[in-house]
């Protein structure tokens, strides 16, 4: 089977490409390398340098004929999306429309789409299941929800099947160390903690210790990126087998607080990781935890690497070589 992975050189995309390769698929990665890395490309996958903003480049790659497409090419910083909605609208919504139209013309289905827990907004109950109200509180979440709606219409009108996969907090790195690219200027907690551990940053700012949580810091559902990647393969196979689209959450169903994460990182890295309590970050809910029972029930998906220690230790393996920088 042939799979096209758009955005396959990025952090999540490279893990997804690796998972499809490990399952014996013939993989083509399409990426503009803006935030993706050449070092994330695998010898056993084909690479096409191209941009989703150029429909003719999509048309050219899709002419190769594929049994499906994974779309992970997007901007993803929720905070930035509130400052630059135009850039997010263009990349995340117009870019997705280009992909859908070209895939539809080339007869490529299903599309496996990287969505986000950000589509839900502040939790009205926990854990968050797929039918939780969708009221995104940042523009990034809005773009993901818009694309899900487009997918649903293309399914109804054109018979194009899809899986929309709503990630909670992706973290960790391939346990076998096969992914080489480190994200630059990370905005997420664990990579920032690691940059403090190796001295790239002086200290961690803990955004709030007065939330109504067990230790006052924010609680999130961290899920290992290899567990996410594996679910893309299973979701693709599910949609093909049942000829039916799918919307699922992927999380570990376990909440970890910022302070708990820092504590485990100190223990595992042996580094002091100075942290300072700062004010809350705008738009951050106190707690986000997924219900992943639908993924378990339909896909038999059980996270293998999403415990805190594996998340921290696989990330540390990527960063420890930078200690002397
Ligand atoms: C957000 C999005 C998520 C998206 C992800 C990708 C929302 C609700 N969530 O996750 O959908 O996939 O970004 O980037 O929009 N923290 C600190 N100090 C820091 C950094 C983070 O204390 O320097 C805290 C945050 O306040 C939060 C937790 O760590 O409680 C996780 O933050 P982060 O890694 O930025 O992810 P989210 O904002 O949860």
Image (cartoon, rainbow, N blue to C red):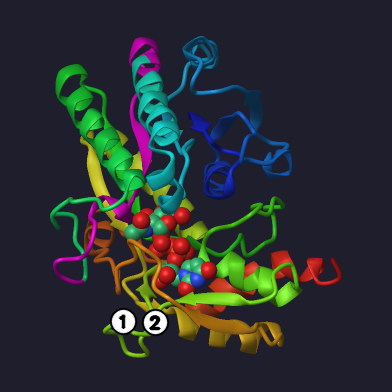
Circles 2 and 1 in contact, beta carbons < 8 Å: yes
Question: Residue at the spot x=70%, y=75% of the render?
Answer: 202
The magenta region covers: 102-126
Depicted 130 relative to depicted 112: above or below: below
Tell me the quarter of the picture where residue 156 sits.
top left
Is 145 left or right of 186, judged from the image as shown? Answer: left
Q: Is residue 109 left or right of residue 203?
A: left
Q: Nearer the viewer, residue 117 or 193?
A: 193
User: Is 144 on the left or on the right of 308, as rendered?
Assistant: left
- The residue singled out by tag 1 in the image is 211
Q: Is residue 107 magenta?
A: yes
Residue at the far right in the pictured view: 324
Frontmost residue, 225 versus 19: 225
Query: Which residue is located at x 28 percent, y 66 percent?
Result: 290
Q: Nearer the viewer, residue 124 or 114?
A: 124
Numbered-mark total? 2
Q: Going 61% across and 29% down the picture, which residue do you hit?
A: 32
- In space, the residues marked 2 and 1 are separated at their CA atoms by 6 Å
Quarter in which the C terminus is drawn: bottom right
Of the image marks 2 and 1, the number of the one nearer the N terminus:
1
- Could you tell me which secondary element the residue under label 1 belongs to? loop
**Residue underneath mark 2:** 217
Residue 306 visible in the snapshot: no
The image shows residue 75 at horizontal and vertical percentages of 47, 41
Magenta stretch contains residue 174? no
10 Å neighbourhood of mark 2: few (<14), some, or many (≥20)? many
Q: Is residue 59 above or below residue 146?
A: above
Q: Secondary structure at mark 2?
A: loop
Say whether residue 249 is visible: yes
Horizontal and vertical percent position of residue 217: 39, 82
| Image coords of residue 316 (percent x, y) | 67, 72
User: Does label 2 point to a residue whose CB lies under 8 Å from ligand 1?
Assistant: yes
């Amino acid at each position: 089977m042939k799979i096209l992975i758009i955005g396959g050189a990025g952090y999540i995309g490279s893990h997804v490409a690796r998972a499809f390769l490990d399952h014996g698929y013939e993989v083509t990665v399409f990426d503009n390398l803006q935030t993706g890395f050449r070092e994330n490309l695998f010898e056993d996958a084909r690479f096409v340098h191209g941009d989703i903003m150029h429909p003719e480049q999509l048309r050219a790659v899709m002419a190769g004929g594929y049994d499906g497409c994974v779309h992970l090419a997007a901007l993803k910083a929720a905070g930035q999306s509130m400052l630059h909605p135009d850039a997010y609208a263009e990349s995340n919504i117009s870019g997705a429309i280009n992909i859908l139209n070209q895939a539809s013309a080339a007869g490529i289905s299903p599309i496996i789409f990287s969505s986000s827990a950000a589509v839900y907004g502040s939790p009205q109950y926990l854990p968050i299941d797929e039918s939780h109200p969708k009221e995104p509180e940042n523009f990034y979440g809005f773009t993901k929800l818009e694309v899900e709606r487009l997918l649903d219409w293309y399914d109804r009108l054109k018979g194009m099947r899809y899986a929309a996969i709503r990630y909670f907090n992706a973290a960790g790195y391939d346990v076998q160390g096969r992914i080489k690219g480190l994200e630059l200027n990370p905005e997420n907690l664990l990579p920032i903690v690691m940059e403090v551990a190796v001295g790239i940053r002086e200290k961690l700012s803990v955004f709030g210790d007065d939330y109504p949580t067990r230790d006052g810091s924010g609680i999130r559902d961290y899920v290992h990126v290899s567990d996410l990647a594996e679910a893309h393969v299973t979701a693709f196979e599910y949609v093909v087998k049942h000829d039916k689209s799918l919307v699922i959450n992927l999380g570990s169903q376990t909440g970890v607080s910022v302070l708990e994460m820092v504590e485990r990182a100190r223990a595992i890295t042996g580094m002091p990781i100075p942290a300072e309590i700062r004010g809350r970050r705008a738009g951050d809910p106190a707690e986000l935890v997924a219900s992943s029972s639908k993924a378990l029930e339909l896909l038999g998906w059980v996270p293998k690497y999403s415990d805190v220690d594996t998340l921290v230790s696989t990330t540390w393996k990527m960063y420890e070589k930078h200690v002397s920088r």
